[in-house]
Amino acid sequence: MSKPELLVLALGGNAISPEHESADIDAQFERTRQTVAQLDDWIGAGHGLVIVHGNGPQVGAALRRVELSAASVYRLPLHICVADTQGGMGFMIARCVNALPATMGVGRVCAAVVTSVEIDPADPAFSTPTKPIGDYLSNENAARLRATLGWTMAEIPGHGFRRVVASPAPRRVVESAAIKRLVDHGTIVIAGGGGGVPVSATHDSASPNQDRPIGIDAVIDKDATAALLAIELGASRLVFATAVRQVFTGWGTPRQQAVDSATAEKMREWLSVGEFPAGSMGPKVSAALQFMERSRDAMANVVICASDELKSALRGVSGTRIAK
């Protein structure tokens, strides 16, 4: 048997709640079952696994509930909504992983950890919020929520208005040591959902005897958090499961070409000349390069693949592989 590896897997939103499909809980469970079923071989081989997941549609729904009930019940801030969806989605993913034949066959357990991620309150992202969350709104509704809830709104041409928040860089996964202890004991862990709950280590004046983290209303890029967690855990492999089969250069142009494999240096070169825009593959490639730069493992690698081709990507026959 080969030496066990530790994989950090970043699941995009389509792995749990695909666009243009029903987003109710039953549908999310079914889609999650289909996705995690592809991890059976990896788990059965005894490898370590940490799953980070997106939560965009789920947080949007949570904020919609906040909006609709604002006049009758207390309001939940964004960072609490992120924590709530981490718990609910973590439960769902863990249920599906724990039902896999491989997981049951080797007596392993999957557990979800509600995860905080430290950010810098002075991050430049807070001066220009750009991350859209929640539903599209009419001008009238956007103005009402701007006035009543203090939300920052941005107009999306052709669609309406959406709330926008800051997306600061993750600095430290607060629970990484606890997650590592679980991994070292064979536990499969769900962590960093939605990029983690953004917290600041600033002293909380409301609790004079405690220097406890303060929740911040922002959204951290889940791919950046997955890369940071992979670095902190010493993972050998980082996989981004997304909506496309692999990375392409010249995307959407006559020169479009699939990238089966590339060095980190080549990916950095392509990124620098604009091959991977910020609104599409850019964040994943940036996160991949951060992991490759800081990993101490000479064999560390990154795979970017479609969520429904995860099994074949882990076998090395699909997706894009980035190596040192």
Image (cartoon, grey):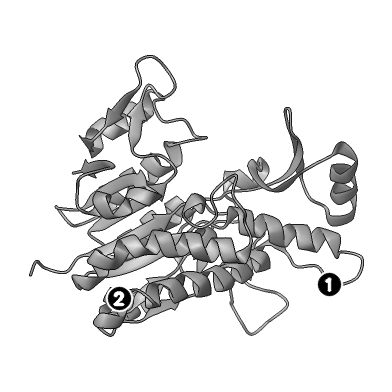
User: Label 2 to label 1, Cα distance in Å?
Assistant: 43 Å
Q: Nearer the viewer, mark 2 or mark 1?
A: 2
- Image quadrant occupied by the N terminus: bottom left
- Identify which amino acid the numbered label 1 is placed on: Tyr
**What percent of the width, then of the height, locates residue 273?**
37, 23
Residue count near mark 2 (Cα–Cα under 10 Å), binned few <14, some 14–19, many ≥20: some
Question: In screen coordinates, is 109 left or right of 44?
Answer: right
- Image quadrant occupied by the C terminus: top left
Mark 2 or mark 1: whose residue is earlier in sequence: 1
* 58, 204: nearer the viewer: 58
- For disc 2, the marked residue is 101
Q: Residue at x 51, y 56 (%)?
A: 54
Quarter where residue 107 is shown: bottom left
Q: Residue at x 48, y 35 (%)?
A: 280
- For disc 1, the marked residue is 74
Residue 186, visible in the rendered structure: yes
Say above or below: 79 vs 261: below
Say above or below: 184 vs 201: below
* Residue farthest top in this picture: 254
Residue 196, visible in the rendered structure: no
Question: In screen coordinates, is 216 left or right of 237?
Answer: right
**What percent of the width, then of the height, locates residue 288?**
33, 46
Q: Residue at x 66, y 68 (%)?
A: 80
Question: In screen coordinates, is 136 left or right of 28?
Answer: right
Quarter where residue 243 is shown: top left
